[in-house]
Amino acid sequence: MRLLSWNCAKALHSKWDPVIDLAPDILVVQEAACPAVLRAKGVPLPDQAQWIGSDKHRGLLVAAFGDYRLRVAETYFPGLHWVLPLEVTGPEAFALFATCDTYTMSRQGDPEAEASDAVITALSRYAELFAGGNAVLAGDLNKNVKFDVRNGTRTSPRP
Amino acid sequence: MKALSGHGYVSACHAHRGEMHGEETEPTHYNLYRQHSPHHLDYCFVPVGWRIDDVVVGGERAVGLPRGEVAQ
């Protein structure tokens, strides 16, 4: 199983061919337009595509190819926008947490989501899926431990 | 990273390459598209027992894409 994750900077429509050249089975794209916008621009998205976001030009897209299928987990909590839990079935079956942690947490959601970061909150909220030992978390976490060391609690290079 | 590690997950890139977090040899992102500001911010965490055949960071191939974004 080949998984590809990329922050496309809102330009997946112009970068689709090189992405497909990499032959992903599962594709996780941050800052991707919604499927309707992408298809209107000629992107041949597969049927198996899930997208979340409040800006139709900048969301979180997951697509599956071949015999892989995607289904949003029953426990999905929309208030935690930037972690999308999916059930992946096919040649390999696992839980997939696609993420794009850009600090854009839902103000209408879980209070925990605003007090912590998306991944930490997801580990708690989706504990059962993670506990199964058969999950993948992929995406732009916008974090590196070197920022922890340098700046205490700051975990992003952005000011 | 510690939280995910505590749940039994490892970064596929770090595990496959034997690299420490914060000491990555390849960036996944150039801040504000500046070549002199490389960072490793993109990850794929998998269960610690999974076999990882390969990990590829976009590198030069992705740098050649519009505005120099880098894929993992």
Image: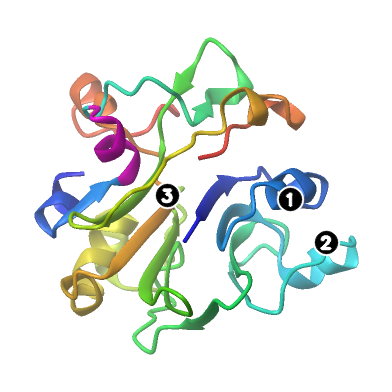
Question: Which residue is found at the position 46% from the left and 67% from the top?
Answer: A81
Cβ–Cβ below 8 Å for labels 1 and 3? no
Q: Which residue is mark 2?
A: A43
Q: Earlier in the sequence, mark 2 or mark 3?
A: 2
- Res A85 → quadrant: bottom left
**Mark carried by residue B63:** none
The residue sitting at the top extreme is: B36
Q: Please name whichever residue, A3 or B39, is drawn nearer the observer in this view of the structure.
A: A3
Q: Type of residue at label 3? A: Tyr
Cβ–Cβ below 8 Å for labels 1 and 2? yes
Magenta-colored span: B12-19
Q: Type of residue at label 1? A: Leu
Give the distance between the C-alpha atoms of the residues marked 1 and 3, in whole angstroms: 22 Å
Q: Which residue is mark 1?
A: A12
Which chain letter goes with mark 3?
A
Q: Type of residue at label 2? A: Val
Q: Is residue B60 left or right of residue A104?
A: right
Mark 2 against mark 3, which lies toward the viewer?
A: 2
Q: Is residue B16 magenta?
A: yes
Q: In the structure shown, which secondary structural element does the residue marked by tag 2 occupy?
A: loop
- Badge 2 and badge 3 in a common chain: yes
Which chain letter goes with mark 1?
A
Mark 1 against mark 3, which lies toward the viewer?
A: 1
